[in-house]
Amino acid sequence: MNTALKDTALSPSHTRIPLVIISVLSLIYFANFFTPLRLTNDTVRYFNIKDWLEAGQPAGAPAGNDFLPHGYVWFLMLLSQLQIAKPFFIAAFHFLYLIGALWFVKRLLGSSFKFWHLAALCLLNWVTLKFVITPLSEMQFLFFSMGSLYFCDRSVTTKKAVHFVIALVFCIAAIITRTAGVVLLASFLITFFLAKRRDILNLARTSRLFIAGIIAGVVGVIILFHAFRVVSNVRDYAYYFEPFLKSPLSFIGNNIRNHLIDLSAISLNAPSSHLNFLGIPVLLLRLIYLVTGLLTLGWVFYLLFRRSNKVSLLIKVYLVCYTLLVLNWPFFEPRFWLPAVPLMMAVVLQEQKLTNSFTKYFLSAYRLVYILVGFTALGYYTYTSHNKKALSVKQDAGVWKNEYETYFFGKPQTDTTAVIREPIMNILKKYQ
């Protein structure tokens, strides 16, 4: 996270710099809209569920038992109805989701930082570009999550029920997109309890009607979740909380370590595996990333709670709840941090006076490295977006290379004895 991108007010001669920077980054993203279809395991699952729904949900199809929520599938179905379920339009809508999410973050944290700083910081990160151009639910989930937080926070300020209703709509959309959206609902309830705890405790002691209302609300949520296939997903995800309960030491040594390393891949703007060319021993490199992840998370939460008047209680609760969820997640990938990253960046970018010379020089060096690595990463993705041979080998660590090479060149180029998976070929033929 880059505090050094936060500089002093721009002089008149520099007023065009933000526009130039954002325009250049946006053009790089636009160039990547022309990428071939980027496959991942979850991408294939989303397309399979989409085809299953469009076929009338035939019994016995594997997609019928897939626990992925259908929110992103419905997005793909909408694009399909419009005859634009292609990589260019998917990436374009993902980009709009991203810009909308960043706008919500800016509105949430007021005038304490400049919007273009946040936009540049996010657009320069490899994780952002990767999930703008990959058919996965990350950007949709980010948009609905930030929108839900914004309208909930807005409802507290305006006291208007319409804002809270909109917040609930965004919250439901987020949960339908990814089950992790239940963190939003938990954040709303925890924030409300903390803000009104005295009144709630008094009502709980004196009013049976209040208790009945709470029970009715819980039942209503369960019914709503069941209607949108969320309840079954919560059951499926229940085992995600087993690692800590079964073996706390293993949990700390495995889950937290790996997720902190993933967070470092975002704050350092490069996965550790991409730095092997430096000749640093793997164990030492992972140790560096572990320490960096720990420092990143510690710094963000230090700033988050130090600036009590700049960040609302809702944002604090959400970041704590989402962080706890990610640290307990049994799968490891930097994308799981993505829904919290813009908020973390915004917290770090908030105005602060730096008096320590070492800190100033360190942050200036960090800014330079972050920018250079960022442009390198964007260049790499742009190269693979426009080089089919490179994409075939590099995308998802080459898992789909034979299907890509068969689709692009008529036969596998690297493993002519491999069996070509027809379902994957059908996805490429239909959506490429």
Image (cartoon, rainbow, N blue to C red):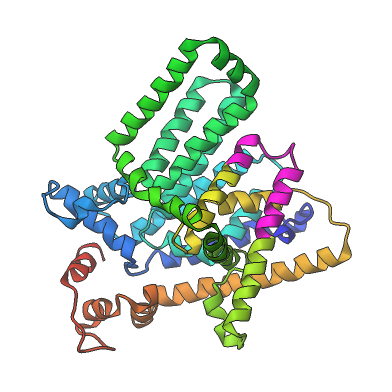
The quarter of the image holding the N terminus is: bottom right
Question: Seen in the image, is 307 located left or right of residue 19?
Answer: right
In the image, the segment drawn in magenta is 296-317
Instruction: Look at the magenta stretch and give its main secondary structure.
Output: helix
- The answer to whether residue 342 is seen in the rendering is yes
Q: Residue at x 57, y 42 (%)?
A: 318
Residue at x 53% of width, y 31% of height: 189
Q: Where is residue 130 in the image (x, y as percent from the top left)?
A: 45, 65
In the image, 382 versus 209, the foreground residue is 209
Q: In this view, does 89 lie above or below 224?
A: below
Q: In which quarter of the image is residue 374?
A: bottom right
Quarter-wise, where is residue 227 in the image?
top left
Instruction: Please check the rendered image and state whether residue 298 is part of the magenta-colored stretch, yes or no.
Output: yes
| Image location of residue 294, percent across then percent down | 66, 62
Find residue 88 and report its image quarter: bottom left
Residue pictured at 65% horizontal, 41% vertical: 109
Horizontally, is 287 left or right of 138 in the view? right
* Residue 178 seen by the camera: no
Q: Nearer the viewer, residue 157 or 79?
A: 157
Q: In the image, is residue 86 part of the stretch drawn in magenta?
A: no
